[in-house]
Image (cartoon, helix red, strand yellow):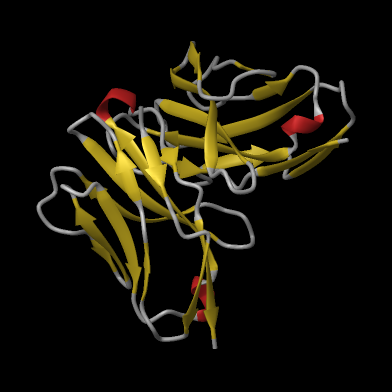
Amino acid sequence: AQKITQTQPGMFVQEKEAVTLDCTYDTSDPSYGLFWYKQPSSGEMIFLIYQGSYDQQNATEGRYSLNFQKARKSANLVISASQLGDSAMYFCAMRDKSNDYKLSFGAGTTVTVRA
Amino acid sequence: NAGVTQTPKFQVLKTGQSMTLQCAQDMNHEYMSWYRQDPGMGLRLIHYSVGAGITDQGEVPNGYNVSRSTTEDFPLRLLSAAPSQTSVYFCASSDPGYNEQFFGPGTRLTVL
């Protein structure tokens, strides 16, 4: 069974600093994808970044990077140079080959950026 | 290009009432799904469809029905609303593989 664990319910970060959001996952399928979504207070789900299990390099998208440690089953999101607009809930999710119709989500981490 | 649309955005029901949450996508995606989001629990899969005419249950299907008569539409029916179904409901669509799932804006449902 798939499982995503986000152990940090909430985090505070100073504006312009970097923040790391933890995510660990569990799957027996060797082929899978890992996703991070942002949910601001307005409620929509915004896709941030994707990492495939066979990708050799860590994914990056602008200020977002994914620290993928396959042996540890870890896929942490790093947000560099935090901005006030980064304040939101962040979800880690996984989709594997045997269940590619769905995403399994973690419980989320709330990030609050302080000026 | 509208992406994934959901109606209504907000709804209040009384216990025992029925209603349908609408979802439509214009990206010709094969897969469509319904999730519910409750505080502290992330999103959980209610029902999904891998193509027109094909639906199946997810993790939390009780109290909900779905149908998929066209590629574009995937309505979610609450048969007899209960307070435990108070939640935010998201519809999503995607194609097979590991591509991004596209989410609708959500429907906030309150059952009194």
Q: Would residue A105 appear left or right of A35 to someone viewing this image?
A: right
| Outermost residue to the left | A56
Q: Total number of numbered labels?
A: 0
Residue sitting at 31 percent across and 29 percent down? B96
Measured from the top left, where is residue B84 in percent x and y?
A: 75, 31
Q: Quadrant of residue B47?
A: top right
Residue sitting at 58 percent across and 15 percent down? B67
Q: Would residue A101 appear left or right of A57 to someone viewing this image?
A: right
Measured from the top left, where is residue A43 in percent x and y?
A: 62, 55
Q: Nearer the viewer, residue A40 or A76?
A: A76
| Outermost residue to the top | B53
Q: Nearer the viewer, residue A2 or A82?
A: A2
Quadrant placement of the N terminus of chain A: top left
Q: Quadrant of residue B11?
A: top right
Measured from the top left, where is residue B18 in percent x and y?
A: 81, 21
Q: Would residue A76 appear left or right of B94 to someone viewing this image?
A: left
Q: Would residue B10 appear left or right of B33 to someone viewing this image?
A: right
Quadrant placement of the C terminus of chain A: bottom right
Residue sitting at 9 percent across and 52 percent down? A56
Above or below, A33 against A30 in this view is below
Measured from the top left, where is residue B42 in percent x and y?
A: 54, 44
Q: Quadrant of residue B23?
A: top right
